[in-house]
Image: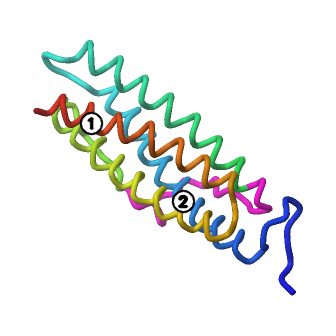
Amino acid sequence: MSQVNAIGLNSAKSEDIVTSLNTLLSSYQIQYMNARGFHWNIKGRNFFELHVKFEEIYNLLLLKVDEIAERILTLDGAPLHAFSDYLKISEIKEAKNISDGVAAVENLLAGYSTLIKMQRDILVQAGDAGDEGTASLMGDYITEQEKLVWMLKAYLN
């Protein structure tokens, strides 16, 4: 008989989801810092609109960082909290010295594409584990970010 955690999910499957969520958390933290850096360093003709948009994006990312960490705790896991850990396991790389608007938007677009793929994988993993809470969270993120990807692509075209 398998062991279940306090919320009635298989403990082993929950541990696997926690591992995936910690990788997602790490990737979100890097995406957040990239967006924050773009907000601080953007220059050029589209400064005003991009400065505001990047702030909107990093605020949305920060909310999700907290939600993911709390989901990890709900599953009896421990969220990573050292930036050195984030850098090791993130599927998104740091963006340094970017002040050009097109390059910044391209970077964010690539990061969101990575996050969406990761979230789809976790959605399947959560579904297989009967983890409606994680599945719902991932579904909400995917829906929101698919629209943002469309908008970022439209900006570039």
Q: Mark 2 to mark 1: distance in Å?
A: 21 Å
On residue 123, the disc is: 2
Element class at badge 1: helix
On residue 150, the disc is: 1
Question: At 41% across and 23% down in the image, what residue appears?
Answer: 55
Dot 1 amino acid type: Trp
Which region of the structure is painted magenta? Answer: 73-92
| Residue 15 x %, y % | 70, 71
| Residue 22 x %, y % | 59, 60
Closest to the observer, 51 or 112: 112
Label 1: how many residues lie within 10 Å, few (<14), some (14-19) or many (20+)?
A: few
Question: At 44% across and 36% down in the image, what residue appears?
Answer: 144
| Residue 89 x %, y % | 48, 65
Q: Earlier in the sequence, mark 2 or mark 1?
A: 2
Dot 2 amino acid type: Leu
Say above or below: 7 vs 157: below
